[in-house]
Image (spheres, rainbow, N blue to C red):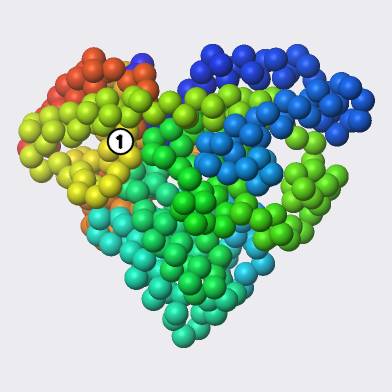
Amino acid sequence: MVYLDHNASVPMTAAVIDAMTAAAWQGGNPSSVHDYGRRVRARIETARKEVAAMVGAAASQVVFTSGATEANAMALRACGRGHVLVSATEHVSVLDAHSGSIRIPVEADGVVLPSAVRAALTAEDVDAGDAVVSVMLANNETGVIQPVAEIAAVVRELGALMHCDAVQAPGRVPVDMAALGVDMMTVSAHKIGGPAGIGALILRDASLLRPDTKGGGQEKGLRGGTENVTGIAGFGAAAKSTRDVDGVDAIARRRDRIEARVKQEVPDAVVFGANVARLANTSCIAIPGIGAETQVMALDLAGYAVSAGSACSSGKVKTSHVLLAMGVDDDLARCAIRISLGPDTGDDDVDGFVAAWTDLIHRLRRSAA
Ligand code: PMP
């Protein structure tokens, strides 16, 4: 099986599994004051430094959570702002974090314009001084990269808070929280080769949040509960590996090769976000007339793991809200699949995938004719 679904989850590396295994053998509670506890605590603090370094932040800014979903919800709820504005192509964990959130529209290429954010924050019924804005760094379905620094400048100027879901970015594009000028940033371990079930919210200042549960006061009182030590150890090891972005150009060449060959064989194929800045590893392509589910299942049988345009949470394939927000016709959006490459995806994998896919498309179209 060739795995081309790295935006859903990146396989763990040996270094990550080793770090988790060592933490698991050690056991213990990091809040214990004895030597045993102190050694567990040290493991957590080493990982915290690695996660902070991954986004150019200080260790003291990192709050570990159970993943990006919790971090996104925490950011948008516990900041206590009355108006929550989110871009229309955010991950569902941002869209649904706050029941009354306002959607900021995106352009046809998937980009959120700073002017659209300004318009949303200065709308008559919005108090920018009591608002929080959430715009992701890179979209999980299309790979489209948002002008987060420019947007954050507008948000700051108008007195609102800025949150950024940067889950898909580390190891793929440089991430520097201070340079981006955001107040809160979400990251997740399993998107960078760490384990699922651990993530972090990184805060410019811990006083930005007022959580409604404190528990045992862990994570600066912002996220109580005994820390997930093995998960955190794996997250730290994975974060360390994101410093090595040497392979990104080779990944981009392979992604471009897939797109060029598919366009050559299937001229009416549509590549979304092709003309704007995108993650090097991600391609979202629609084949008109062939449903995403049919493509994903047939490719699975052929030995290739890809996903439907929308990351499906419970195995169900829904029409992508991301593509619909970009103004893509519903029928076309239903025919989009996402291919996301990883550092170990080779030329042979790419060539085999394109051959299997185009063969399948020709076959299905012939039988429908
Ligand atoms: N945000 C984005 C952009 C994502 O791609 C995902 C995972 N699909 C999440 C948030 C949720 O991450 P987690 O699984 O860590 O809750």
Kind of residue indicated by mark 1: Ala
Neighbourhood count class around disc 1 (C-alpha, 10 Å): few under 14, some 14–19, many 20 upward: many
Q: Which residue is mark 1?
A: 280
Evaluate whether residue 118 shows in this view: yes
- Can you give x and y, in whole percent of width and height, for residue 83 in the image? 56, 72
Q: Is residue 256 left or right of residue 126?
A: left
- Could you say which is closer to the camera, residue 92 or residue 43? 43
Q: Is residue 244 above or below residue 224?
A: above
Evaluate whether residue 297 shows in this view: no
Q: Is residue 326 left or right of residue 121?
A: left
| The furthest residue to the right | 34
- Can you give x and y, in whole percent of width and height, for residue 41 in the image? 78, 29
Q: Is residue 257 above or below residue 96?
A: above
Q: Give me the residue at 41% from left, 56% from top.
A: 148
SS at badge 1: loop
- Could you say which is closer to the camera, residue 154 or residue 12? 154
Q: Give me the residue at 66% from left, 35% from top.
A: 48
Q: Is residue 126 left or right of residue 220?
A: left
Q: Is residue 221 left or right of residue 257?
A: right
- Can you give x and y, in whole percent of width and height, for residue 334 in the image? 28, 47
